[in-house]
Image (cartoon, grey):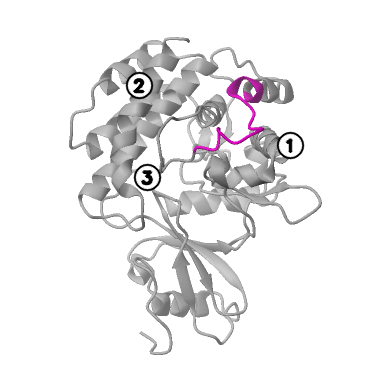
């Protein structure tokens, strides 16, 4: 380790990173030493801001310790942002993918640093005021419509997933993820899983789907005359599939959660934040898709997030998380199960 700077955050060996970048992208880095910080807020993959004193980049790698099968796929994230960088969907410019685990202990990729703010709470969003908040969230819907309008074949993503039987596979996948990460009893979750399976809707034509689409996963640039979405981030769950799964997730995140100091993105309480019905109506009008089954997709989103949160809680109990806020994750899982069951009853 260099003696003129502190060590990097957990999971990021700056000397090894520098050596790899100097070999693979000579001239990318300035002469100054690398420094880095963990970008807080994510509860899954680890994200770091890295600088050489002149320019900035972002490094993404899987979490430390327990990693679920098929999750945290760096190749997948890098591939989709590389493809979408040529479209109207705003994504950071990819720099490098490294699948050699000898470098950082896990695969990782590097992308450009994009200025902007990920709004995670109603309190953070409130200073924008009602009009700008409303415009920002409706812009999130418009960007989702743009994503779902991308022709996968035209951008080299024609084989990015298997759309046939997508919803059935998703239910089975998340059921397996739950089994792999559960160390406690979770009343109602089997009931929710089974009920979703009994009422599968018919999917529309497949598109590129983000898989975790919400205001927390985009950067909003407020520096210009008009606010704009500067980049969509966190593509680890992206694939080809049913676009209404993205809409259902966005609707789920637009429901107010009466949970004090929630560690999950809860911007819905900000003044001016559109309600779920308005988001659904805007998506339907701009995309032309039938959204009559949106309650099923929203219930599925509650189930999926319950499984994800339980996986994070499981890693926390094993002492394999980095950052703050993980101690409250486990308490949210029953809340999400309850919302899923009540939402599905409206389908």
Crowding at dot 2, Cα within 10 Å, few <14 / some 14-19 / many 20+, comes out as: some
Which residue corresponds to mark 2? 338
272 in magenta:
yes
Q: Earlier in the sequence, mark 1 or mark 3?
A: 3
The span picked out in magenta is: 266-279
Which residue corresponds to mark 3? 71
Q: Residue furthest left?
A: 184
Viewer-proximal residue among 197 and 248: 248
Viewer-proximal residue among 250 and 13: 250
Crowding at dot 3, Cα within 10 Å, few <14 / some 14-19 / many 20+, comes out as: some
Answer whether labels 1 and 3 touch (C-beta < 8 Å): no
At which x and y percent is residue 101?
34, 65
Viewer-proximal residue among 327 and 178: 327
Residue at x 40% of width, y 77% of height: 16
At which x and y percent is residue 321?
30, 54
198 above or below 138?
Answer: above
Residue at x 68% of width, y 41% of height: 154
Q: Is residue 130 left or right of residue 182?
A: right
Viewer-proximal residue among 39 and 196: 39
Residue at x 35% of width, y 27% of height: 335
Task: Tell me, yes or no, if residue 244 can be seen here.
Answer: yes
Gap in Å between the C-alphas at discs 2 and 3? 25 Å
- Mark 3 residue element: loop
Task: Tell me, yes or no, if residue 170 can be seen here.
Answer: no
Gap in Å between the C-alphas at discs 1 and 2? 32 Å
Q: Earlier in the sequence, mark 1 or mark 2?
A: 1
Which residue corresponds to mark 1? 131
For the residues carrying marks 1 and 2, which lies nearer the camera in this image? 1
Majority SS type along the magenta span: loop
Residue at x 60% of width, y 63% of height: 113
């Amino acid at each position: 380790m260099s003696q003129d700077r502190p060590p990097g955050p957990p999971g990021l060996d700056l000397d090894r990173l520098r050596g790899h970048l100097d070999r693979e992208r000579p001239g990318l880095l300035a002469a100054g030493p690398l420094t880095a910080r963990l970008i807080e807020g994510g509860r899954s993959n680890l994200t770091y801001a890295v600088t050489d004193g002149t320019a900035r980049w972002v490094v993404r790698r899987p979490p430390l310790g327990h990693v679920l099968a098929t999750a945290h796929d760096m190749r997948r994230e890098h591939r989709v942002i590389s493809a979408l960088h040529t479209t109207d969907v705003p994504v950071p410019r990819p720099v490098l993918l490294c699948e050699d685990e000898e470098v950082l202990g896990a695969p990782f990729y590097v992308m450009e640093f994009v200025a902007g703010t990920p709004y995670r709470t109603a309190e953070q969003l409130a200073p924008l005021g009602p009009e700008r908040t409303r415009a920002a969230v409706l812009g999130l819907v418009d960007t989702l419509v743009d994503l779902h309008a991308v022709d996968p074949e035209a951008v080299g993503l024609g084989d990015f997933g298997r759309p046939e039987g997508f919803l059935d596979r998703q239910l089975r996948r998340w059921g397996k993820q739950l089994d792999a990460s559960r160390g406690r009893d979770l009343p109602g979750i089997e009931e929710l899983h089974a009920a979703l399976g009994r009422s599968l809707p018919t999917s529309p034509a497949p598109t590129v789907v983000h898989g975790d689409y919400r205001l927390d996963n985009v950067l909003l640039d407020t520096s210009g005359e008009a606010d704009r979405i500067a980049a969509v981030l966190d593509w680890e769950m992206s694939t080809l599939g049913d676009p209404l799964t993205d809409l259902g997730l966005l609707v789920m995140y637009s429901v107010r959660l009466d949970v004090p100091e929630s560690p999950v993105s809860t911007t819905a309480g900000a003044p001016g934040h559109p309600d779920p019905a308005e988001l659904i109506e805007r998506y339907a009008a701009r995309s032309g898709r039938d959204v009559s089954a949106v309650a099923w997709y929203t219930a599925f989103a509650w189930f999926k997030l319950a499984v994800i949160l339980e996986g994070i809680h499981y890693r926390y109990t094993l002492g394999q998380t980095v950052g703050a806020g993980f101690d409250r994750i486990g308490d949210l899982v029953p809340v999400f199960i309850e919302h899923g069951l009540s939402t599905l009853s409206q389908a």
